[in-house]
Image (cartoon, rainbow, N blue to C red):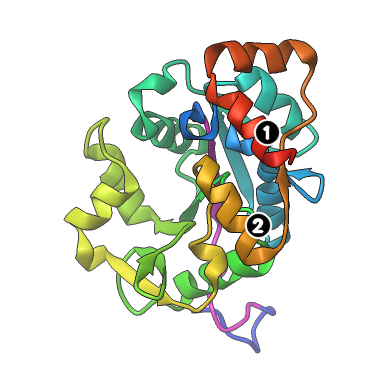
Amino acid sequence: MGCIMKQGGGLYSRVRVGAILLAAGQGSRMGGVPKALIELQGVPLINRQLIALSGAGVDEVVVVTGYHHDLVEPLVEQFPVRIARNLNPETGQASSVRLGLEALGANFDAVIMALCDQPLINAVDIAQLIAAFKKRKSGEIILPMVDGNRGNPIVIGRIALDQMLESGTNMVCRKFMDQHPEMVELFHSDNEHFTMDVDSLEDLEKFEEKTGWHLQLPNLSDKAKQRLANTEPAYMALQRLVCK
């Protein structure tokens, strides 16, 4: 353990933290629009996540893209992150998680598994989870809990990460936690940032009703808009909803 009187190490040992930001989804419940591109106060949700991770002192970030990679990747090029493109995103989130872990490498004590559809997550929230991981009494995974509901992001320690990679290609974080409850330490909080997400058209309305903030569609090219409209008819419903 570090010592506050020795080399400025603080009360807890330095932990090298990486992050995987999942942005490979099709956005089928969101009218075919990638949730990463939806904007809050003019800032795409994926950029808000990257700003939060950077502000919390995360050492390295891998962004996993897949569906809509041509729309998502240009948004993150301004950030010092690595991009891992899932060439088979239809195989599900487990393949994106594995790809992200492999791209990030093993030189980390803990990895934050972050999602693009949580508009209110900020640097303070991420820092709280990292602090909880450092202070944990047992286990290898920090899972935020708000009013009895699971939240995100989660923090996964090295031992759990290695076991996840050894568990097969279909292993996802929730399944692993359910199978290994002894490795999970709950971080109880009243912070609804951890449980507030926008996964569907209905969630956009609920978010605005609860927060008063309006989420809007990204400023896409006409070609991109037409592609989304042709492949996912619900895109037009989303456009009417957020532009009302």
Q: Can residue 211 be seen in this view?
A: yes
Q: In the picture, which quadrant includes the C terminus?
A: top right
CA separation, marks 2 and 1? 15 Å
Q: Badge 1 is on which residue? A: 240
Image location (x, y in percent) of residue 147: 40, 76
For marks 2 and 1, give the one nearer the viewer: 1
Secondary structure under tag 1 reads: helix
Residue pictured at 63% horizontal, 87% vertical: 4
Secondary structure under tag 2 reads: helix
Image location (x, y in percent) of residue 172: 31, 42
Residue closer to the observer: 41 or 240: 240
Few, some or many residues within 10 Å of mark 2 (<14, 14–19, 20+): few
User: Range of the magenta residues?
Assistant: 9-25
Q: Badge 2 is on which residue? A: 208
Q: Is residue 33 visible?
A: no
Image location (x, y in percent) of residue 114: 52, 49
| Residue type at tag 1 | Arg
Q: Is residue 232 left or right of residue 236?
A: left
Residue 165, relative to residue 147: is it above or below? Answer: above
Few, some or many residues within 10 Å of mark 1 (<14, 14–19, 20+): few
